[in-house]
Image: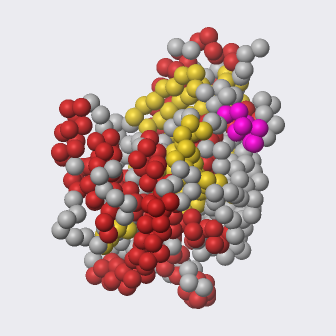
Amino acid sequence: MSDPIVLTFDVGTQSVRCLLVTPDGAFLDKEQMTYETPYFSREPGWAEQRPDFYFEQMAEISRRLLARNGALTDRIKAVSVTCIRDTVLCLDKNREPLRDIILWLDSRKAKFDRPFGAGKKMLFDLIGMGDSIKKIYKATAANWLMQNEPENWEQTDKYVMLPTYLNYLLTGELKDAAANMIGHVPFDYKNRRWMGEKDLTRCVSDVPAEKLCELVPSGEVIGHITEKASERTGIPAGLPLVACGSDKGCETLGLSVVRDDRASVSLGTTATLQMATKDYFEPQPFLPAYPAVPNDLYNPEFEVYRGFWLVSWFIKEFAAGERADAQKRGVSPEQVLDESLKRVPPGCEGLLLQPFWTAGIANPNALGSMVGFADFHTRAHFYRAIIEGIGFELYNGLTTMQKRSGKTVKELYVAGGGSRSDAVCQIMADLFGIPVMRTQTSEACAVGASIPAFIRLGVFKSYEDAIARMVHIKDTFTPDAENHAVYASLYEQVYSKIYPGLKTAEKNIMTIYKRR
């Protein structure tokens, strides 16, 4: 009897992918669509999209994929969907959208109009959470909606994440995995449930309980593909839709990171480092560990918000020559720039970059900076400093999480666009001082999203069993001891001191230009 297949969707910020996944971690076929307009902005800093945009793209690529794989249809036994995080919409009583989707990229700000009362504000300030809580409150889309669109908010029967809505369109069930509730919502990450009325930080995103969806564990059947969804997507009606988790969580799982001596690094638009632990701990003060796809694990995470977006920015602003060269050679600009990485020594001869193009919750006043610039530095130095700066900040995250947890990470597993570069992977190995592993596919997220479905189907008994068969190490990058010594010295003596040294100046800049 032929092995079953899982039909998996990976809905991203820039594109959507649909894959036929087998129990050995291979893809029998794949269809992808890059969005012509990933989002639109009615006002500066806004990022919105039409309510049914993502489902329409899913349906189109699903029809294409299944049309050319008709012989395999009977082997498809389950469906899974993983999706971008912190992307929300409002539904009325008939489950119809009331307005456009607000994406995670959106930077609109609610007014901080003393919503907590003097007592709580004093408490948050006393424990050092004042600035962070204020930043989170202002960045919460629900707070902005309550203040600026009260009529829409009044009519909102359910306030849901994007994957929840996609689940509804596929099955008619407004349910979602707890591992998907990562964003500005009143979620108790430690206990994988909605916050209670008395939870300390509920006031930061005080969405009424009745407006929130039903939560289920990963691996549970959310519902079955309806006839209406089948007509639009080509997916056979009646197939189970199995709950998995967020795109980052699925990627971490698809990289085989289910032990606390491993970490996953996603070198994408947002660069992240995630661990997998059974013990709950805050990766940074007052920031939660996210629920992992396996229901007994957490994914403490450290983010560099603009991550490898910096590479795209650099190519656009400073690499016209490399772009022209790449076009002539029929390669990407990144491949041309990678060649320059080898001409610059580790540490860029004293040039260091702090990659805070967007400040984080734990450092709300941070700005990007570059130190050590001299007249002999070139564009190649600048480019390598970007790669190393992202690496230094991720390494800073790892050292922080290891101190807070008592865990020691011995191996890194990489994914995301930056991981396609051998040079970038080697820099990460040298900088972290531990081996960097690259698996058999850049679609680690899809592998991870399919694993709960295979377990539900009985193909595997556990996540460990699934990983043993589905995840395969393709490349290992071993750290160079001399290079690591250079990076370790630069981190301890220079990089780790940049933000504390510039903190007051950066806060003053923000105050002067009213950037908060």
Side of 355 relative to 286 (left or right): left
Q: Is the N terminus in the top left, top right, bottom left or bottom right quadrant?
A: top right
Q: Residue at x 65, y 44 (%)?
A: 256
Foreground residue among 305 and 489: 489
Side of 266 relative to 512 (left or right): right
Q: Residue at x 61, y 48 (%)?
A: 252
The quadrant where residue 241 appears? top right
Q: Residue at x 54, y 22 (%)?
A: 29
The quadrant where residue 305 appears? bottom left
> Residue 16, relative to residue 207: is it above or below?
above
Give x and y (percent) for residue 96. 54, 42
> Residue 19, relative to residue 151: is it above or below?
above
Residue range corresponding to the magenta coloring: 463-470
Give x and y (percent) for residue 197. 70, 70
Give x and y (percent) for residue 187. 65, 62
Color style of the picture: secondary structure
Magenta stretch: dominant SS? helix
Q: Can residue 469 be seen at all in this image of the molecule?
A: yes
Q: List the single residue furthest toward the front.
A: 482
> Residue 416, relative to residue 402: is it above or below?
above
Q: Is the C terminus in the top left, top right, bottom left or bottom right quadrant?
A: bottom left
Q: List the single residue furthest toward the top.
A: 71
